[in-house]
Amino acid sequence: MKALYGPCEICGNSQWEIQYQGRIREGGFGNLSPETCYVARCSNCGIERLNEKACKDEEFYEKGNYKNLINEAEEESSSRAKRNLEYVQDLILGERAGQESFVIGEIGCAGGHFLSQVEGLGKEVVAVEPSMLYHAKLAQRGYRVYSMSENALEDYGRKIGLIFCFAVIEHTQDPLKFLQEIKGLLAPGGSLILSTPNRRDILMEIGLEGYRQFFYRCVHRWYFDRESFSFCARKAGLQVVEVKSIHRFGLSNAMAWLKDGRPTGAAALPHLDSPDLDRYWKEYLSSRGVGDFLFFKMKSEQGSL
Ligand SMILES: [Zn+2]
């Protein structure tokens, strides 16, 4: 393992335990990495990491290649933004509370689909997005646009009351540094709401081999569960004040994985097309913490600002 893994970027520990070894997803289902990849868990802080050689570098995102690789349609981005708003609705209640000059922001906002839904919350909107492809469009909407959080620090250090960041941290070079930079932007008492895939979702917990090969992917360097993320947040000076596990798919999706070993999205299997059943399934997984996404609400730790 020494050749593949250096000291843990989060805690400095050098002991890693291999969790997965083999080809992993590169793009959509069925496209696999040409080479064997390794995912190992830090024996101290519990974060899981893909071996560096198998990871896509930052330039990959800056040029917008990632969106091509996953071939994401505009419509899909828009419906995902709507779902994200649904998931965070209870987390943002009362966030603005009478503050006149409230600033909101999103890190990794792509074309701004989510921000456009919540822009009314802020007097100013800060859009952080590494891919230049979106910058003109975001600026047209009146947002202040930056490529990275650290570039926004001079103008917005300790000024943003509410920051969102959906499914970005798993891609970053260094999640600790990433969180520390976002923390630098948070206004005193401000909140950060962040999501990332849950490596302990129901199909991972069952240990379905085909799903594990699909779950681990070349564009994700890091894989979190509730505890390992909270450790990393604490280390960055952030306190997790709420955690939610969300499951995006109905029962048919899991049954189809078990039956055929492949993703079927929202397509229903016979007799499993009941909205009530799906609602119960999603709520049940959520209550057990084994939904496929984690949402964290964080605040700056007292005394660390
Ligand atoms: Zn560690």
Image (cartoon, grey):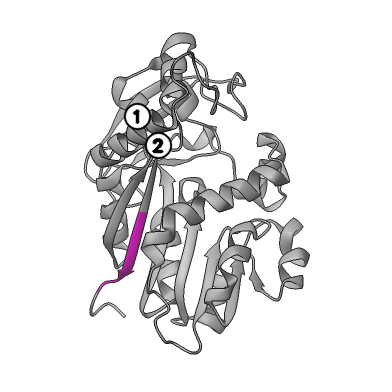
Range of the magenta residues? 296-301
Q: Position of residue 169 (x, y in %)?
A: 46, 51
Q: Nearer the viewer, residue 89 or 16?
A: 89
Q: Is residue 137 magenta?
A: no
Can you name the residue that lies furthest to the bottom here? 100
* Rendered image quadrant of residue 91: bottom left
- Badge 2, how many Cα within 10 Å: few under 14, some, many 20+? many
- Residue 92 in the image, given as x and y percentages of width and height: 40, 66
Q: Is residue 199 visible?
A: no
Query: In the drawing, does residue 232 fall left or right of residue 74?
Result: left
Q: Residue at x 51, y 46 (%)?
A: 171
Callout 2 amino acid: Asp
The CA distance from mark 1 to mark 2 is 29 Å
Tell me, for residue 153, which label it has, or none: none
Quadrant of the rendering where the N terminus is positioned:
top left
- Seen from the viewer's position, the closer of residues 6 and 50 is 50
Q: Main secondary structure of the magenta part?
A: strand
As drawn, the label of residue 292 is 2
Q: Which residue is mark 1?
A: 1
Instruction: Determine whether, in the image, residue 53 is placed left or right of residue 184.
Output: right
Q: Identify the amino acid type marked 1.
A: Met
Residue at 71% in and 41% down? 73
Q: Secondary structure at mark 2?
A: loop
Q: Badge 1 local density, few (<14 within 10 Å), some, or many (20+)? A: few
